Amino acid sequence: MLNAVIYVALKYSAYSFWMYIGLKLLANRFDIRRALWFGFLRLMMGVCFGVGIFITSNIVAAVIRATGSSSEIAAYLSVYVPVRWFEWGIMSLTLQRGLSLFAVVFGNDAAGRKWRLGGVAISCLADLVLFSELGGLPIGRFLC
């Protein structure tokens, strides 16, 4: 239980930090309270998307396993990374007003794409705590 609390606290801290960076880079705002709120929203978004990721990553892992390949890493990368890209795209809507669906999927500009890529990296790096606790990639867990 303590490890779960640490994991959630780490994710929240990382997301809040990255939202603060996004506020500075993309919206030219320096608001820690807003960053904390957006970090919480990002954490909750991960929980909501987690159900779909749970199902999808297990299906992808089974399909990859059937081909004889390394299923856990391939499933993680092919499911979690694109979903996180999209999640951070949704968060970019909170920072950059007037974005289109195209911009949410592909990014609005180079700065926004770099920020989103950093968000994906932070999301994945925060999972390392859970990986070490579970002894490997936890495919199907609610990690986003």
Image (spheres, rainbow, N blue to C red):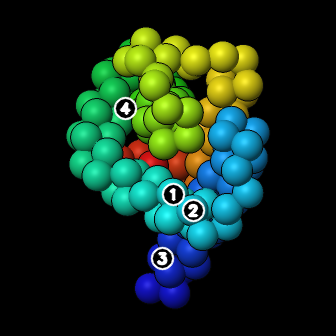
Q: Which mark is residue 4?
A: 3
Within-10-Å neighbours for mark 3: few <14, some 14–19, many 20+: few
Where does the image place residue 73, in percent across and percent down from the top left? Answer: 55, 34
- SS label for mark 3: helix
Q: Position of residue 25 (x, y in %)?
A: 75, 39
Identified at 46% across, 25% down, the residue is 98
Quarter of the rendering containing residue 63: top left
Label 2 sits on residue: 34
Q: Residue at x 57, y 62 (%)?
A: 34
SS for dot 1: helix
Horizontal side, residue 90 vs residue 13: left or right: left
Q: What residue is at 73 percent from the left and 43 percent from the top?
A: 28
User: 131 or 38, which lies in front?
Assistant: 38
Q: Which badge, 3 or 1, is on the more N-terminal residue? A: 3
Where's residue 62, x and y in %?
A: 31, 30
Check disc 4 and report the residue beneath it. Answer: 61
Name the amino acid type tagged 2. Arg
